[in-house]
Amino acid sequence: MYAIDFVEFPSSAASSSGRFFARAFGWTATPYGPDYADVAGAGITLGFQSDPDELPPAPLVTIRADDLDQARRDVESAGGVITVEPFEFPGGRRFHFREPGGCELAVWRPT
């Protein structure tokens, strides 16, 4: 199963971004230190990254997968190029890829 369920945004202040969505829409904000916040609501989770070493250049759409290894094989066999090798993060594991049109996305699997 593949489903878009997460979008990560660059932010100059991740904690402030998280608090904004909690106050404005009543969604749940979970800070992971001063440089990252997750915001969950309306069936999707938003991530806000402000660590300069991890800052995405644009919003990063993330696709949830049941099997990360199979997802990688599917991406590569369809012509995608892996741009970030699989890595662990709080809550799961993911990799990034570029599709033939040039957009970078990610695939993740929760732990």
Image (cartoon, helix red, strand yellow):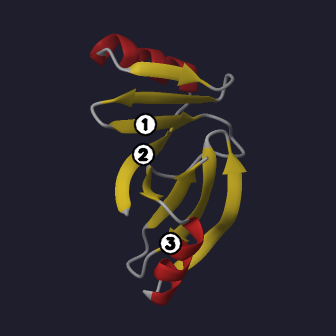
Element carrying mark 1: strand
Q: Are marks 1 and 2 in contact (CB under 8 Å)?
A: yes
Picture quarter containing residue 68?
bottom right
Residue at image mark 2: 6
Of residue 2 and residue 39, the one placed in the foreground of this image is 2
> What is the three-letter code of the residue carrying label 1?
Leu
Q: Residue furthest top?
A: 23
Q: Is residue 52 above or below residue 12?
A: below
Whole-percent x and y of residue 97? 53, 70
Of residue 67 and residue 21, the one placed in the foreground of this image is 67
Whole-percent x and y of residue 33? 69, 23
Residue 78 circle label: none
Q: Earlier in the sequence, mark 1 or mark 3?
A: 1
Q: Earlier in the sequence, mark 2 or mark 3?
A: 2
Residue 46 circle label: 1
Cα gap from disc 1 to disc 2, whole angstroms: 6 Å
Residue at image mark 3: 71
How would you rate the neighbour count of disc 3 (Cα within 10 Å): few for under 14, some for 14-19, many for 20 or more? many
Q: Is residue 48 above or below residue 93?
A: above
Residue visible at 48% across and 60% down in the picture: 66
> What is the three-letter code of the residue carrying label 2?
Phe
How would you rate the neighbour count of disc 1 (Cα within 10 Å): few for under 14, some for 14-19, many for 20 or more? many
Residue visible at 42% across and 86% down in the picture: 78
- What is the total number of numbered labels drawn onto the structure image? 3
Query: In the image, is 53 to the left or to the right of 56?
Result: right
Cα gap from disc 2 to disc 3, whole angstroms: 16 Å
Q: Is residue 10 above or below residue 33?
A: below
Q: Nearer the viewer, mark 2 or mark 3?
A: 3
Picture quarter containing residue 37?
top right
Residue visible at 57% across and 64% down in the picture: 96
> What is the three-letter code of the residue carrying label 3?
Ala
